[in-house]
Image (tube, helix red, strand yellow):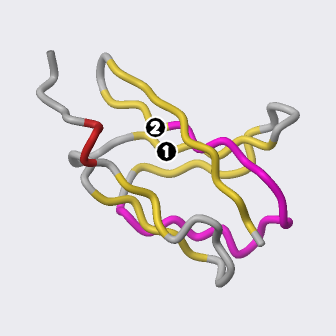
Amino acid sequence: SSGVDISTFSLSPNPVSDGTTYLKGLPEAVSVRLYSLSGQLVHRQITPEVVDVSGLDRGLYLLRVDHNDWTFTRKLVIE
């Protein structure tokens, strides 16, 4: 186990209305990817916790976080 408790993870605000959302409760250096519902990678970064989505169209996206041996996905709405 990597000792990461993803129950402490939060993504807010969600929905995003001002172009920025924040990842909280994650360890250093996680891979963050944002996919459209069609599966296209539209944004990629290694944390910091600020995720700038101001260049993306409104809609529903899938935010995927990877760190060592675990991964999880959350829905992100951009308004």
Q: Position of residue 62 (x, y in %)?
A: 66, 41
Q: Position of residue 36 (x, y in %)?
A: 80, 43
Residue at image coords 56%, 75%: 20
Residue at image coords 42%, 31%: 66
Callout 2 amino acid: Val
Q: Quadrant of residue 47?
A: bottom left
Q: Are marks 2 and 1 in contact (CB under 8 Å)?
A: yes
> Horizontally, is 15 left or right of 61 in the view?
left
Q: Quadrant of residue 53?
A: bottom right
How many labels, in total?
2
Which of the two residues, 20 or 42, is positioned nearer the viewer here? 20
Question: Counting other residues with Cα less than 10 Å from the Cα at mark 2, is it few (<14), some (14-19), or many (20 or more)?
Answer: some
Which of the two residues, 40 or 78, is positioned nearer the viewer here? 78
Residue corresponding to mark 1: 32
Residue corresponding to mark 2: 65
In primary-sequence order, the first of circles 2 and 1 is: 1
Magenta stretch, residue numbers: 48-64
Residue at image coords 79%, 65%: 56
Magenta stretch: includes residue 72: no
> Horizontally, is 1 left or right of 42 in the view?
left
Question: Counting other residues with Cα less than 10 Å from the Cα at mark 1, is it few (<14), some (14-19), or many (20 or more)?
Answer: many
Could you say whether the residue bearing mark 2 is in a helix, strand or loop?
Answer: strand
> Horizontally, is 45 left or right of 66 in the view?
right
Residue at image coords 65%, 78%: 19
Q: Considering only vertical position in the picture, is 26 above or below 21?
A: above
The quadrant in which the C terminus is found is bottom right
Which of the two residues, 50 or 12, is positioned nearer the viewer here? 12
